[in-house]
Amino acid sequence: MRRIKSPRHNRREASVTAYLVTLRDRETQTVVGYYNGAWTTDQRRALTLRWREAAEAHAARMRDCCPRNADVIKVEEIAAAD
């Protein structure tokens, strides 16, 4: 039996994809709010999720709570360092 070698990864180059649930302005499409259990305007308080499915679940719940804003609630992908 031979051992399969996996390629070495440089820790400095490794990155993790994270997701944010955002609320965008209808006119300019700029981000005006971030989801953190409720809505906040402070990006540092935004809930950062590792799994897209979890972010989509939170976004779906907020779309159900705010049907008028459902079309401007988005899941945004960000590259976060380890």
Image (tube, rainbow, N blue to C red):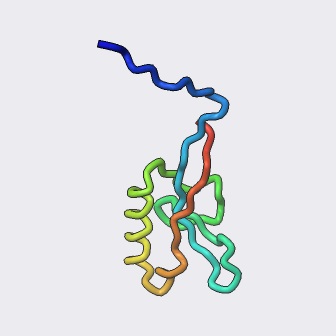
State the count of labels.
0
Hey, which quadrant is residue 63 in on the image? bottom left
Q: Is residue 61 shown above or below 48?
A: below
Q: Is residue 8 shown above or below 46?
A: above
Residue in the picture at 65% in, 60% down = 42
Query: As rendered, which of 45 and 82 lies closer to the eye?
Result: 82
Residue in the picture at 66% in, 30% down = 12
Residue in the picture at 47% in, 87% down = 68
Residue in the picture at 49% in, 65% down = 38
* Left or right of 25, for residue 63: left
Where residue 9 appears, as percent x and y from the top left, is 57, 27
Query: As rendered, which of 33 and 30 lies closer to the eye?
Result: 30
Where residue 2 appears, as percent x and y from the top left, is 34, 14
Position of the C terminus, as image quadrant, is top right
Position of the N terminus, as image quadrant, is top left
Where residue 34 appears, as percent x and y from the top left, is 58, 64
Query: As rendered, which of 30 and 43 lies closer to the eye?
Result: 30
Q: Outermost residue toward the left?
A: 1
Where residue 55 appears, as percent x and y from the top left, is 44, 59
Q: Is residue 81 shown above or below 74?
A: above
Q: Outermost residue toward the top?
A: 1
